[in-house]
Amino acid sequence: MNYFRTAILLAGMTALFMGIGYMIGGSGGMMIALVVAAGMNVFSYWNSDRMVLSMYGAREVDRSSAPDFVGMVEQLAARAGLPMPRVYIIDNPQPNAFATGRNPNNAAVAATTGLLNALSREEVAGVMAHELAHIKHYDTLTMTITATLAGAISMLANFAMFFGNSRENNNNPFGVIGTIAMMILAPLAAMVVQMAVSRSREYVADREGALICGQPLWLASALAKIANAAHQVPNMPAEHNPATAHMFIINPLSGERMDNLFSTHPATENRIAALQALAQEMGVGRESGVSGGSGWSGREAAGPASRPSSTAWGRRGGQSESGGRRGPWG
């Protein structure tokens, strides 16, 4: 049902885009608009991952620089039946994470230092399993397409003021009023569709991620912590690039709390409730993890190597205020 809904929403956005092109320049305008959109989508298809990772200053890590973190992602990817994605760490105090890439063979996952410091090993496993679920279902490509179409629609709406009222153009029967309405409503409609696609994919990724790591409550606990911190710790790159907010597991922008048409993510409370229901359905508690008949304790993620003395990003591990190890890497 979610795939059908996503397809309908994408079809609606494409129809809106074509309609604006027709109103501006008739059949010729519609064709030009489609060519421009196609060019933008091709560029985004090949370059969106590099663009967004560069935008957030993400640094690629491997087993030598972040053995625990990379080992965890490697094991989770194997459990999901995915190729090993590239792994990145972002120096940002806000706990958050996202996935990007045009397909599973050209994918990347990124987590902030805030996430790796604030969450337990099990919670980080739940988050990364969620991001791998996005990759598995090609959500990263879908959201790239919707973001590109939304940007193109906004661009066309701006063109409408300059080209939509020429005497030669009789495709807009509402004249100046119709043009002004289109400038306001078209980008708004595109934004609503983009956010609706994003929200529908988050619920699917939550469920699939829980099945990958074998424990829905790990992800539920992580979502609660991330949502609480995301509204207290600013993410300035995200604030400067709000069009990328839908990529993160929790909206990185301040003041986004309601599950409505204008939110990029479902309400965290609703996501947690769905994960708790899934845990009851699976018959698992917080300490156990089962998926496909085999458990995973989370502590296996580092592989056969002994636990390193440094954190995943190369600094010494710290102690929590209670005296325990801070995060899953120390």
Image (tube, rainbow, N blue to C red):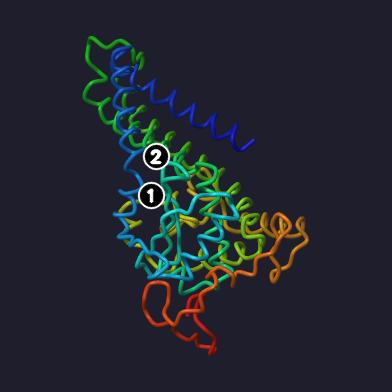
Left or right placement of residue 250 versus residue 175 in this view: right
Query: As drawn, which residue projects farthest toward the front?
Result: 304
Q: Quadrant of the N terminus?
A: top right
Q: Nearer the viewer, residue 274 or 135?
A: 135
Residue topped by disc 1: 244
Secondary structure beneath dot 1 equals helix
Place of residue 5 in the rendered image (x, y in percent of width and height, measured from the top left): 58, 33
The residue wearing badge 2 is 147
Residue 194: image x %, image y %?
46, 39
Give the secondary structure at mark 2.
helix
Foreground: 79 or 167?
A: 79
Q: Give the residue type at disc 2.
A: Ala
257 versus 44 height, above or below:
below
Label pair 2/1, CB-CB below 8 angstroms:
yes
In the displayed structure, 166 sits above or below 280; it is above
Q: Residues within 10 Å of mark 2 (few under 14, many from 20)?
A: many
Task: Relative to 180, say whether 232 is above or below.
Answer: below
In terms of sequence position, does the residue under pointer 2 or pointer 1 come before the other?
2
Q: Amino acid at mark 1?
A: Thr
- Which residue lies at the image location 39% right of the left edge and 30% below the top edge? 186
Name the outermost residue toward the bottom.
323
